[in-house]
Image (cartoon, grey):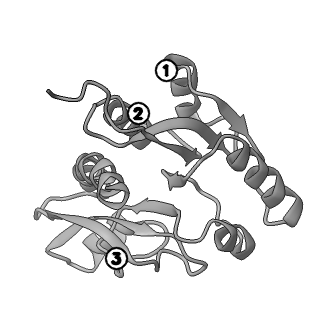
Amino acid sequence: MEKLIGPKKIKIAVFISGKGSNLNNLIKFSKLKNYPFLISLIISNTKKAEGLRFSKKYGIEKKIIKYEKNLQIDKKILKILKKRNIKLICLAGFMKILSKNFIKKFQGKIINIHPSLLPKYKGLNTHLRAIQNKEKYAGCSVHYVTSKLDSGKIILQKKVKISKKETDVSLAKKVLKKEHLIYPAAIKKILN
């Protein structure tokens, strides 16, 4: 007889600063039976993050914490994560760099999605830089977060072809579609 109750889902927190399209996408995947995670907390460094609306829409707890690299804020966030039994942090357009201390305390349990084929184009303006350098391909990477910016071990990558008439805006849209495919797949891969 088939089991009706699936395995217990792992609680994750998603950190955002902006629109939250990856957050919204992850929420949708988390509701599927064969995805082993549940988003139980959204943390933003700004109350202006549009993605916070998904907290209300899906009934997910949200916290707005003005993130600065200091021990007090690290302790506050770590306490919140521990209290809610969060096992994995997913950065999704979180525009702050986490402190070394914070990363150390959550070692190997923080992942990020980055809009380039790492190790190329770490940091910002990835699409424009790829076009200016006449790259044939761009893409996105899901990687573990380390204290070095966009340098952790890569979990999954997906590439897209850069067309002759590509702009940074059109390329961003192409890459975002791939981000929406690989982020949930990467989480599933590391949790299974």
Quadrant location of the C terminus in the rendered image: bottom left
> Residue drawn 70% across and 42% down?
46
Residue 89 on image: x %, y %: 54, 54
> Residue drawn 71% across and 36% down?
63
Q: Is residue 42 left or right of residue 177?
A: right
Query: Looking at the image, is 112 positioned above or below residue 169?
Result: below
Give the residue type that dot 1 points to: Tyr
Q: Which numbered disc flags the more N-terminal residue, 3 or 1? A: 1
Q: Judge whether residue 61 can be spotted in this image.
A: yes
Query: How far apart are the alpha carbons under marks 1 and 2?
Result: 8 Å
Residue 43 on image: x %, y %: 64, 42
Q: Which of marks 2 and 3 is in front?
A: 2
- Of 141 and 186, which appears nearest the observer? 186
Query: How far apart are the alpha carbons under marks 3 and 1?
Result: 32 Å
Query: Looking at the image, is 74 positioned above or below residue 35?
Result: below
Q: Which numbered disc flags the more N-terminal residue, 1 or 2? A: 2
Q: In this view, does 103 lie to the left or right of 68?
A: left
- Badge 1: few (under 14), some or many (20 or more) residues near its Cα, within 10 Å? few
Tell me the element at label 3. loop
Give the residue type that dot 2 points to: Ile
- Of 42 and 51, which appears nearest the observer? 42
* Residue at numbered disc 2: 27
Query: How far apart are the alpha carbons under marks 2 and 3?
Result: 25 Å
* Residue at numbered disc 1: 58
Give the residue type that dot 3 points to: Leu
Q: Nearer the viewer, mark 3 or mark 1?
A: 1
Query: Looking at the image, is 69 positioned above or below residue 181?
Result: below
The mark tally for this picture is: 3
Tell me the element at label 1. helix
Tell me the element at label 2. helix
* Residue at numbered disc 3: 118
CB under 8 Å between discs 1 and 2? yes
